[in-house]
Amino acid sequence: MQELIKYGKKIVEAGLAHSHFGNVSKRVGDQMLISTTGSMLDELEGQIVTVPVDPESPDELDVIASTEVNVHRAIYKETSALAILHGHSEYAVVMSMLYQPGELIVPEDSESIYVLHEIPVVRGGVGSEELARNAAHALRDHKGIVVQGHGTFARGATVDEAFVILSSIEHACMVKYLAEIAKRISV
């Protein structure tokens, strides 16, 4: 739990989400620790609940768990993820509106290419089954995704690894956006 609290603060401090946007989770066996809906990422003390990854019926804590709880569940069920971070970083959101779902954002800089290779753009409303399905599918073969007009999801074997991916997505999108503007100006 302390690890999620620590990285919630880091997400806000790094500008990867505003305090009230985004969510964090960590898988522990057949359960997950997840931030509550409406909680501030930089003030998660007492705002993390434990819910089953694969409930037989809706859990009573689902009501207060993040509105994206079903997206986290789908990702845990379909990937090897043990941690998921969801942010709303500026350049990633802008780039998501310049690409269509199904397209790939291919980074321009060598570090982003090395870490991410490419970033799928997916579609789906906040907490929707469509988003859960599309995110889980895309994250089977990728470490991070951008949801069109919404934000980013990163998966990792650890919370730290997921944070590196979340940060890398924003860096890749910022560099690509600025490089594309520079190319247009120089023509």
Image: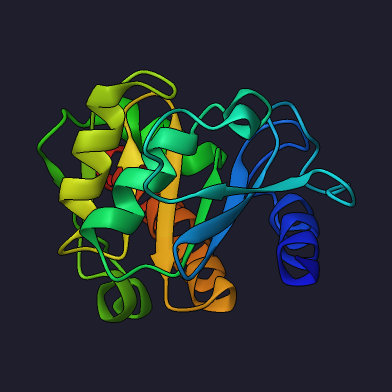
Q: Nearer the viewer, residue 145 or 114?
A: 145
Point out residue 113 in the picture as x, y percentages from the top left corner: 26, 74
Q: Is residue 55 left or right of residue 65?
A: left
Q: Nearer the viewer, residue 14 or 174?
A: 14
Numbered marks: total: 0
Colour pattern of the rendering:
rainbow
Point out residue 82 in the picture as x, y percentages from the top left corner: 44, 70
**Vertical side of 108 occupied by 127: above or below:** above
**Vertical side of 151 occupied by 33: above or below:** below
Point out residue 78 in the picture as x, y percentages from the top left corner: 21, 56
Q: Quadrant of residue 114?
A: bottom left
Point out residue 22 in the picture as x, y percentages from the top left corner: 61, 39
Q: Residue at x 37, y 67 (%)?
A: 81
Q: Residue at x 44, y 27 (%)?
A: 150
Q: Nearer the viewer, residue 29 or 20?
A: 29
Q: Residue at x 38, y 38 (%)?
A: 71
Q: Residue at x 72, y 36 (%)?
A: 18
**Vertical side of 143 occupied by 61: above or below:** above
Q: Is residue 136 left or right of residue 158?
A: left
Q: Is residue 120 left or right of residue 175?
A: left
Q: Quadrant of the N terminus?
A: bottom right
Q: Nearer the viewer, residue 29 or 139?
A: 29
- Residue lying at the far front in this picture: please name it: 56
Q: Quadrant of the C terminus?
A: top left
